[in-house]
Amino acid sequence: MRAALILAVLAGLPMTVRAQTHPPSAGLPSFEIEAGGGYVFGGGAEDPGPSLASFDVGTVFWPVAHWGVAFGLVRGPGEDHHDPVEGYDRTFFGPENLAYWTITARYRRETRYSLVGEIGFGLMGGGRFSDLEYLHAQQRWIHVKTVFGGFVLETFWSRPITRHLGVKGGVTFDFNVETNNLQPVLLATVRF
């Protein structure tokens, strides 16, 4: 449902005269800065990550018309606490404070309606979040840190608004089986 909303917003954006904008596939090397946010849906088999609103910032270098390299940072400050779960010696309250980086190879292609489709695959690293726990014997709160890395799949639809400004919406899936993050995202882009 969110993906349909993002695509509807992208399709309805006003487009300047095509002659004034250089389509991304014009063959010129370009550099983009992406910034925005979304919502990370945490999951996983063994150590599910938190589900939090997120802030995303990244860069993409397009040395040729259809291929580029992207680097991104994702931060999900806050907490995803749930009803307390009693353990033998502690009580579990849930995960909080998600952070990780990604590096991907991206492929892009212009489609109908002046939209540009992008897909990417790469690596996720520096992943970390903490679990809030209360230790009964010591009567104190602790934040148990979890670290992770893995792989990234991403897809975006972008639309230029002016020669240098655009908007991009899509979904990223960052995974390693134990900790998975599915993130619908909406980004503003600046292209040079």
Image (cartoon, grey):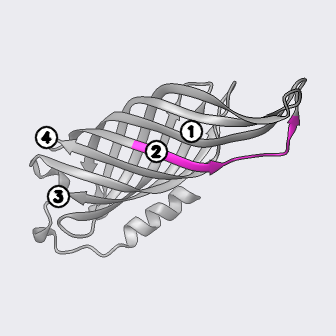
- Give the SS element for disc 4: loop
Quick one: label 3 or label 2, which is nearer the N terminus? 3
Q: Which mark is residue 181?
A: 1
Q: Nearer the viewer, residue 20 or 74?
A: 74
In magenta, the rendered stretch is 73-85
- What residue sits right under mark 4 in the picture? 64
Apparent side of residue 95 relative to residue 93 in the rendered image (left or right):
left
- Give the SS element for disc 2: strand
Please name the amino acid that badge 1 sits on: Asn
Q: Residues within 10 Å of mark 3 (few under 14, many from 20)?
A: some
Q: Which mark is residue 75?
A: none
Q: Residues within 10 Å of mark 1 (few under 14, many from 20)?
A: many
Quick one: label 4 or label 2, which is nearer the N terminus? 4
Q: Residue at x 38, y 67 (%)?
A: 11
Q: Which mark is residue 23?
A: 3
**How far apart are the alpha carbons under marks 3 and 2?**
28 Å
Q: Main secondary structure of the magenta part?
A: strand
Where residue 107 sits in the image (x, y, percent)? Answer: 28, 39
Please name the amino acid that badge 2 sits on: Val
Apparent side of residue 148 relative to residue 23 in the rendered image (left or right):
right
**How far apart are the alpha carbons under marks 4 and 2?**
26 Å
Where residue 162 sits in the image (x, y, percent)? Answer: 21, 70
Please name the amino acid that badge 3 sits on: Pro
Circle nearer the viewer, 1 or 3: 1
**How far apart are the alpha carbons under marks 1 and 3?**
31 Å
Which of the 4 image quarters holds residue 15? bottom left
Please name the amino acid that badge 4 sits on: Val
Quick one: label 4 or label 1, which is nearer the N terminus? 4
Quick one: label 1 or label 3, which is nearer the N terminus? 3
**How far apart are the alpha carbons under marks 4 and 3?**
13 Å
